[in-house]
Amino acid sequence: MVAWITLLGSRPVSTWFSVGGGEGSAESYDEGNPFERSVYFVLILHGVIVLARRGVRLREVIAANGWLFAFFLFWGLSILWADASFVAFKRWIKDLGNVVMVLVVLTDGKPMEAMKAVFVRSAMVLLPISVLFIRFYPEFGRTYHVWTGEMMYTGVTTHKNSLGVVVLVSLMFLVWDFTSPPAPLARARARLSRLGELSLILMGGWLLIKAGSATATGCAVVGLSLMLLLSWKALRTRVGAIEFIAVAGTLLLWPTGIAQGVLDFFIVDVLGRDLTLTSRTDVWPMLLGKADNALVGSGFNSFWTGERLADIYGQLGIIQAHNGYLETYLNGGVVGLGLLALLLLSAIRRANVQLAQGSDVAKVGFALILINVVYNFTEASFDKTSPLWFAFLMVMTQYRDSRQPAAADLVAANDASNGVDRPRALPPEARW
């Protein structure tokens, strides 16, 4: 699991071993790399074997995650009308690998502890090496933008925005673990563990500043603040009402220009960007004009393939729309965009229920869902081999083996026999 997240959060494994070439070109993006595929295939196969040995029932996974199943089923069917069906199929299998790895964690005996462990341990690898590369090995930790020549701090990744995402996800889980009650360890060991996590958090802050990724920085501030605020019971139990007020207020104030003014202030004064979001808003209409099918799109991650990829890359030097919602529309049309909206809404609804019940994991879960919603306005992470998409799948997927009683049910039964009164267990639909 740590290997999977580490691969998602670093440069392609083929570049570490100098296998293949043309990294970053349109051709390499379209064709992929056989060595890369082999590594991911071995990891996915290993994950499937683990799930088979644990006796995971597929129908129970589907029943508990209906909208997620519908989302991936649609993308699987979209392979049929993709221009390069085999390329789309390979990308779909790779994305399914994310779900396999998520289930490996959730079927662990202690899923919440396993979730923390895999992200914290991957941060122990990715963050220190990124600092090492940037500070002492600039040939590995720094690069120059292909079109502008601007120097970028990239660490173990290939782009400043990629480094920003790695740090963003790492900080969310590091701060969550750091602010959680410590495990029952020896005092000296517990103190050392806390000191290590604090040093990683400081590394993450430094890397976020060096990367200069405005979207990742803004999302980190919002996500971390929200996660800490949700520690207050008074706020947790009123999240639904706050969401309603925020949405209704935005809709009512938008015609007056007040909401637009607040948004402009955030973009220009807080993030330090121009109102075109570094020319993104100029590019989006051009990409919409190249859309194949408004209803079902070009097929799973198939808009950026073939002659269209070469043409757009040659004109604009980009291989993604820098907007996850537009990217979803280009690949899946209105149907794909609608399924994504339903998936996000179901995740938010589930998080609201869990927050009201006082679930600890719901704090980071709700924050990560919101981060994904915000992040994809200026970048694209939906359906990508991205740590942010993987983290979203991790916190919104649920699994419970019907052959075993839930841990909360066992606790309730034990309390009843001992005359202990606790708050009632979460209903099945509200469990992660």
Image: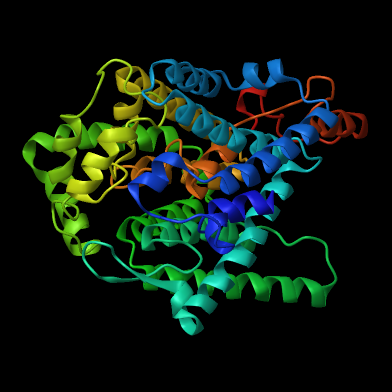
Relative to 345, 292 lies left or right: left
Q: Is residue 54 visible?
A: no
Coordinates of residue 412 in the picture (x, y in percent):
82, 30
Coordinates of residue 91 in the picture (x, y in percent):
50, 34
**Which image quarter holds the C terminus?**
top right
Q: Is residue 55 visible?
A: yes
In the orientation shown, which residue stands out farthest toward the left? 256
Q: Residue at x 16, y 57 (%)?
A: 265
* 99 vs 192, nearest the viewer: 99
Q: Relative to 3, say whether 341 is above or below.
A: above
Relative to 298, 92 lies left or right: right
Q: Residue at x 58, y 53 (%)?
A: 7
Q: Quadrant of residue 239?
A: top left
* 398 vs 20, nearest the viewer: 20
Coordinates of residue 151 in the picture (x, y in percent):
30, 73
Q: Residue at x 48, y 73 (%)?
A: 140
Relative to 350, 194 lies left or right: right
Coordinates of residue 186 in the picture (x, y in percent):
85, 71
In the orientation shown, which residue stands out farthest toward the right? 417
Q: Relative to 399, say whether 313 is above or below.
A: below
Q: Quadrant of residue 188?
A: bottom right
**Count of marks overlaid on the render:** 0
Relative to 37, 267 lies left or right: left
* 143 vs 110, nearest the viewer: 143
Q: Relative to 84, say whether 225 is above or below.
A: below
* 257 vs 338, nearest the viewer: 338
In the orientation shown, which residue stands out farthest toward the bottom? 136
Colour pattern of the rendering: rainbow
